[in-house]
Image (cartoon, rainbow, N blue to C red):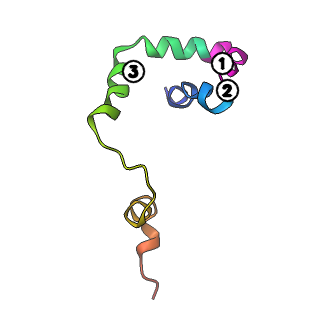
Amino acid sequence: MAVWGWSRLIPFVLGAEAPKQFPNVQRHLAEINARPAAARALALKDKHAFKAEMDEAAKLAMFPHLGKKVA
């Protein structure tokens, strides 16, 4: 399941022809995509507004140690 999140992005990262280089990964991706849980997982992005810019609040959310004072 962990590879599913990344393997579905192969065409965007490596190019439109890249999936042909990984037939087993594409088969695995198709099997997972056929599951109802995959559809529910993909639908999550439509239910929530995600922040795209890396402002100060985002940096502190991702890297909370940066906001801690060192004594």
Which percent across, then down, holds residue 11? 61, 25
Q: Earlier in the sequence, mark 1 or mark 3?
A: 1
Q: Which residue is mark 3?
A: 38
Give the quadrant of residue 8.
top right
Residue at 44%, 63% (x, y): give it. Answer: 59
| Outermost residue toward the bottom in this view | 71
Q: Secondary structure at mark 3?
A: helix
**Does residue 17 appear left or right of residue 39 in this picture?**
right
Which quarter of the image is occupied by the C terminus? bottom left
Question: What are the residue bounds of the magenta stretch?
Answer: 15-25
Q: Secondary structure at mark 1?
A: helix
Disc number lying in front (1 or 3): 1
As drawn, 5 above or below 48: above
Q: Is residue 21 magenta?
A: yes
Count of number-bearing discs: 3
Q: Secondary structure at mark 2?
A: loop
Q: Which residue is mark 2?
A: 15
Which percent across, then down, holds residue 25? 62, 18
Spatial CA span between label 1 and label 3:
19 Å
Mark 3: which amino acid?
Ala
Residue at 34%, 15% (x, y): give it. Answer: 36
Disc number lying in front (3 or 2): 2
Q: Which residue is mark 1?
A: 19
Give the quadrant of residue 58.
bottom left
Q: Is residue 24 magenta?
A: yes
Q: Earlier in the sequence, mark 3 or mark 2?
A: 2
Which percent across, then down, holds residue 3? 55, 28
